[in-house]
Amino acid sequence: MTLWYLTRGAGVVALLLLTASTVLGVLTAGRWRSERWPRFAVAELHRNLTLLAMAFVGIHVGTTIADAYAPVGVKDVFVPFASHYRPIWLGLGALAFDVLLAIAISSALRRHIGYRSWRVLHWSAYASWPLALAHALGSGSDARTGWMALLAVACGAAVVLAIAGRLIASRSRALQLLAGAATFGLAIVLGAWYAAGPSKRGWASRAGTPASLLKKTTVASPQLVAARPTTGFSGRVVGRLSSSGPDAFGNAAIAIALATRGGEPGLVKLTIWGTALDDGGVQMTRSEVSFADARTGTVYTGTIVGLEGTLVTADVTSQDGSTLRLVMRLQIDAGSVTGAIRASATDGVSG
């Protein structure tokens, strides 16, 4: 779990640093300066940001390889589109990494390869930014979260504004039209792709996540066991609780993973979003509940309809319209969850 958080955090920080480096690179190419920031200072800051971005990319890559959850090896980091795990989107990240490595190596050998060759290679660095952004949204586990969407929009806006300022200062009308069309066209394509892809449910499967990992992810989520879900079941449960937030707006989320003691295994996921409370709880604003019957493969989804202290009531419905009411009495102690669950078939009407 620690490696997973490190991978996500390092990836987000690397994207922010790469965005800042790209913006400064565009401004430096346009010979931008101010009284407080002469050109040499901007160029030095650009260089340091790029080096720092590469350091966080290195952490991101290292923790991804070390984390045994996803089958990503050393080869997959350098060879694009060779991975069995989300090959396209991981491949874009590998391409961005290769470009950054080429820039670092060429900068170290600048005296030997000449300024002109170095300059040509250096310009390819700008390709690493859209590749990194597409990789973050296509393979990142936070792609559907609101904060990640806002961060991606902010990064895109910063780069687009920097390029727009560079074009305004350019004396070449043809360059303005060509670069402007390419930049805004790319922004529109990325936005449309995100809206139709990573922001939608089921993206993990469509992105190329192996079926074995999807099953593993479900088991790791709030889960359960059912003998006969169409007629009901009951039993004891044990599991874990995880939480995130609060963010700058006071929003937080809580997820609970459960498994019954004995019986046939099944899967349940409880996720609660809301405003963080002083005692560590959350005042619920919305929720998601899923239950997968391992015996029949039937998946039920729904929401929490009752939350009173340790008593949680949820209604979940399958694709064929069958509805179950899940009633759980849970006890939480330092991240561990124990309790009891009872499920019964209903007519789909909340009581």
Image (spheres, grey):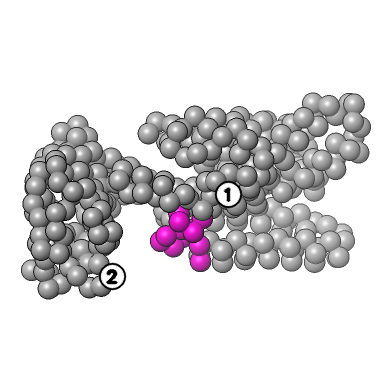
Spot occupied by residue 154 in the image (x, y as percentages of width and height): 55, 53
Mark positioned earlier in the residue sequence (1 or 2): 1
Q: Is residue 72 magenta?
A: no
Q: Are marks 1 and 2 in contact (CB under 8 Å)?
A: no
Looking at the picture, which amino acid does disc 1 mark? Answer: Pro
Q: Is residue 197 magenta?
A: yes
Picture disc at residue 319: 2
Q: In the rendered image, which residue does mark 1 sit on?
A: 87
Residue 74 seen by the camera: yes
Question: Left or right of 227: which side holds 31?
Answer: right
Picture disc at residue 13: none
Spot occupied by residue 262 in the image (x, y as percentages of width and height): 14, 42
Spot occupied by residue 327 in the image (x, y as percentages of width and height): 10, 55
Which quadrant would the N terminus be assigned to in this image?
top left
Crowd rating for badge 1 (residues with CA inside 10 Å; few <14, some 14–19, many 20+): some
Q: Nearer the viewer, residue 351 or 347?
A: 347
Name the residue rendered at 36%, 45% in the picture: 216
Which quadrant would the C terminus be assigned to in this image?
bottom left
Q: Is residue 138 above or below residue 258?
A: below
Q: Nearer the viewer, residue 286 or 155?
A: 286
Name the residue rendered at 23%, 55% in the picture: 295
Q: Nearer the viewer, residue 137 or 165?
A: 137
Q: Nearer the viewer, residue 281 or 215?
A: 215
Range of residues picked out in magenta: 196-207
- Specify the quadrant of the image occupied by residue 124: top right
